[in-house]
Amino acid sequence: MNEEQRIAVDDYFSRMLVSSDTVLEDVLERSADAGLPAINVAPNQGKLLYLLAKIRGARRILEIGTLGGYSTIWLARALPSDGSLVTLEVNADHARLARKNIQTAGLSGVVSVVTGKAVESLEKMVADKTAPFDLVFIDADKESNPDYLRWSLRLSAPGTVIICDNVVRRGRVADPDIDDPDVLGVRTFFKQACTDARLDTTAIQTVGSKGWDGFSISVVSG
């Protein structure tokens, strides 16, 4: 399977299974115009996040890594009318654009965009005794994934679902000769996930318009 075929299949799934959505299309266009990297989830992946949040019955969602707010909007749309989502973004320019995109989507009353280093924001939430989240989506710098998992667990409860994106790294995660900080961060994340008795975890490889990658999904037990 070559790259052209992978992209074609993703496009097919998106056309067949994801309804045309001018709001989300405009989010991608504004993000591109602002020079944001095109590292947002694909439309079919966004719908997967939406469905996972629906399946969980999530009322409170935490997202680590906002970018332009594309995945944020997918997740926020899965919430009930009294639900809430907190998303963390280190880049102030990205956060400003995300707030605009979230407002355009009519979700400003649901979503809070917090600007700053995610670890510091997470630490503050724990110190403030923030109520636990039902679903956590980790999609920021991979080097810090172990820290994100540790703090996310302190903001979780039995039944919380933790999803971590970009864990395959084009296959490099399984290559022992690779010592890239992002790859090492993913490996340490997995070591933590498989040794923490509170977590039940698996991971899936994906191919498509975003290349060869994948995600992990964990459920927090009692």
Image (tube, rainbow, N blue to C red):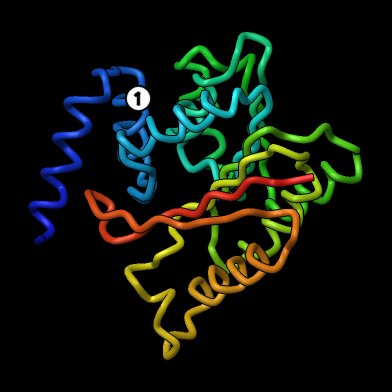
Is 212 on the left or on the right of 40, as rendered? Answer: left
Q: Quadrant of residue 206?
A: bottom left
- Mark 1 residue element: helix
Residue at 46% from the left image edge and 62% from the top image edge? 167
**Percent coordinates x, y for residue 104 in the rendering:** 45, 16
Residue at 50% from the left image edge and 19% from the top image edge? 77
Q: Nearer the viewer, residue 158 or 148?
A: 158
**Percent coordinates x, y for residue 111 in the rendering:** 62, 24
**Residue furthest out toward the bottom:** 177
- Quarter of the rendering occupied by the N terminus: bottom left
Say if 133 sits above or below 173 in the image. Answer: above
**Residue furthest out toward the top:** 81
Q: Quadrant of residue 87?
A: top right
- Quarter of the rendering occupied by the C terminus: top right
* Total labels drawn: 1
Q: Which residue is mark 1?
A: 24
**Percent coordinates x, y for residue 36 in the rendering:** 39, 46
For the residue carrying disc 1, how many other residues have a C-alpha within 10 Å: few (<14), some (14-19), or many (20+)?
A: many
Is 200 on the left or on the right of 157, as rendered? Answer: left
Is 189 on the left or on the right of 23, as rendered? Answer: right
Residue at 66% from the left image edge and 17% from the top image edge? 83
Residue at 13% from the left image edge and 58% from the top image edge? 3
**Percent coordinates x, y for residue 210 in the rendering:** 28, 52
Q: Nearer the viewer, residue 161 or 70?
A: 161
Say if 123 sits above or below 20 in the image. Answer: below
The three-letter amino acid code for the residue at tag 1 is Leu
